[in-house]
Image (cartoon, coloured by chain):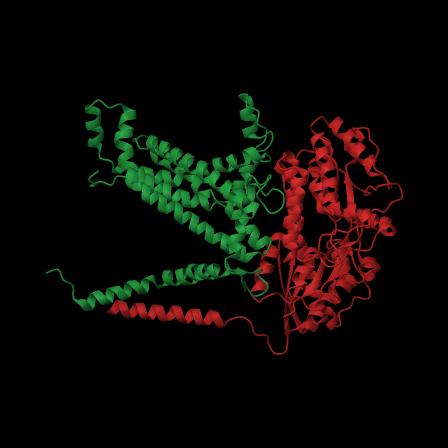
Amino acid sequence: MASTKRFRAALAVLLLAGRLTACGGGDDAGGDVTLRFSWWGNADRAALMQQSIDLFQAANPTITVTPSFQEFEAYWQKMATETAGGNAPDVLQMDFAYLREYADRNVLLDLKKTDVRVDDLIPAFQGVGEVDGALYGVPTGGNTWCMFYNPALLAAAGVEEPAAGITWDQYHALVDTVSKKGAGRTYGGSNYRSVIYSFESYLLQRGGTLYTEDGALGFTEQQLIDYWTVGKQYVDDGRFIPSEKVAQIEPASPITKDLIATEFRWDNFFARYAAETEAELKIGPVPVTAAGGPTGQYLKPAMLLSASARTDHPDEAAKLISFLINDPQVGRIFGSNRGIPATNAQREAAVLEGPALAIAEYEKAIAPLLQKAPPAPPKGAGTVEAAFLRIADEISYGRSSVPDAVDTFFTEAEDTLAG
Amino acid sequence: MTTIPARVRYGDATAGLLFLTPWLLGMLLLTIGPMLASLYLSFTDYDLFDTPEWVGLDNYRRMFDDPRYLQSVTVTTAYVALAVPLKLAAALGVALLLNRPRLGQGLYRSAFYAPSLIGASVSLSLVWKSIFSDDAVVDRGLAAIGLDTGGWVGRPEFSLPMLVLLAAWQFGGPMVIFLAGLKQIPGELYEAAAVDGAGPWRRFRAVTLPMLSPVLFFNLLLEIIGAFQVFTSAFVIATGAAGGGGPAGSTLLYTVYLYGRGFVDFRMGYASAMAWMLVLGVGLVTALLFRTSRMWVHYAGDRA
């Protein structure tokens, strides 16, 4: 009997402990507002973010910001589950590819209903982040599609560095020469045709778009067949690096391992690659169909700031967003960490050097060539992007014929975009 | 008399239940609850954001028109069919070697068991990936004996065998169980067999295997169930082109695809339905094994 008594006592303690922890946490202390703020990034960005938050809190003593961050992949998994649980953070970092996904599901706040300050955004960013007339995200910085090249590898093959106005034919000849000189060890380039953004720039150069205004695919099966057929041909004739070599070094890029001389990417990757390789990389032009033709480049928001539709403090959330995109001190703190800044004030304040300076100068040089950014990609764009890469890869591996692959892609993409 | 007073028996049962409470609560809240929720979700269209919408058997029907789903079933079946026999053979072989008393036996046992302890870790998968790359240990070793395979990681025909080898290498778990089983076999049986003139192979077939069959059955069951659920190695090693399963879908294991559908494509209803199909599939295989076990599993004291 004694043991039962002791057991009951222990149980009571357990239950009590459960109660206590259940009601801990939460309540704001008298009138002060707490904002939860989530972003993706690494420890470097977290340090910069904390400095900016400290500044914001000093300027707004009644607002406390509780930050949290993850790596990109983990961030979106957490965001999906938190949002599903009705527990989204008040302010969150948003990716252009997911903007519509979240906006269409009514989980983002229309910032036009707050007094968020967006008047100082550079012209290319005015209106970006709008979906059907509502403003769901404000860009913090941007990047453009471009070519990276390794001058040393080009020089070793006796090829000149690509200059503005280089045509696709000239580019493919360049790749061929470098690959032949590389003798199976180094190559002129990788199969850029398996990346959807390359295809997008191909379409933009021809006056088309990846997605239509109402979120369907903006191109025909034949266009994709033509595009992928050429890619396959260049994989087979050894112009592009074989897929199995790329797979082994994933997630690193072959250009950082001195395996290829050119690669197409968003220009913000330049800073990352510079940190990952000893080679002196440079940023070059996107080839055109004919001299003087459009480059298909536009300024894409690198990331946006959004607020949750369910936040209890929309005005404070807008205040934080305005501060993070407009305040010159914040611009100086971040430099190019969030892309080249999106507002004039922060562009002037940011002190750029090294790779960041190279990116900024590149963006400045091509500014006159930029086209208007396409509308935010439709819901499911992230899945379509992944399917494009995966299915194109099956062609490279010889697992699928081009027409079959295109057929598969259209089936999957249309299924995804339909909902 | 051995009858126990009812009052005491009742008290024991209560205490037993009370002691089990943490486990029972965990089981109810963390296992049964979510399982029932996923069963419900498998009949809905659920994207994690909007409220689930009832679609009946739609998710289940769609699976059979989904080439990637069928691909994942093929890959997983191949994986189970290759990994389980290989792993059990290795486990039994090493257990037989370790069964004889010799110096440093404990050390050997621990050494062979060690890989199983670190098996599911991410870092190990990364190491595995690097030793199977171009010009790494495996490539060079094979080239030295005239087999020029190149790196295994990026080649669709070699990527699954690479995962199978990783699984087989972690044979420590079943090995320990085999060892315990081997210790249970009475020495007289071997002596009698030897007197009858049976050689080592005959003794193994006629004595060891039948006497070990219950343990073999147990291991087979556990390993098959485990193999159907393998995830980490494929997820880490063969990230492939976006969404996992690469290169060219050759390592698209069931769980990898399930994860992608749920957490990358936000098709949580479909992913739930996939999970339940896996439960059904594994249940079916288990039932089949139990059925056939009567023919080859011998329990001590059986008439057979």
Camera-side residue of A344 and B215: B215
User: Is residue B60 shown above or below B100?
Assistant: below
User: Is residue A401 shown above or below A81?
Assistant: above
Q: Hue of chain B?
A: green
Q: Is residue B62 visible?
A: yes
Answer left or right for A371 relative to B23: right
Q: Hue of chain A?
A: red
Q: Position of residue A26 (x, y in %)?
A: 55, 71
The answer to which quarter of the image holds residue A48 is bottom right
Camera-side residue of B234 and A209: A209
Residue at the left extreme?
B1
Answer left or right for A241 relative to B117: right
Q: Position of residue B134 (x, y in %)?
A: 60, 31
Q: Position of residue A303 (x, y in %)?
A: 71, 57
Q: Is residue A386 visible?
A: no
Q: Which residue is located at x 39 percent, y 38 percent?
A: B110
Q: Which residue is located at x 67 percent, y 74 percent?
A: A62
Answer left or right for B62 relative to A285: left
Camera-side residue of B226 and A383: A383
Q: Which residue is located at x 44 percent, y 43 percent?
A: B227
Q: Which residue is located at x 79 percent, y 34 percent?
A: A172
Residue at the right extreme?
A292
Q: Position of residue A141 (x, y in %)?
A: 76, 56
Instruction: Tell me the quarter of the image containing the N terminus of chain A.
Output: bottom left
User: Is residue B131 shown above or below B61?
Assistant: above
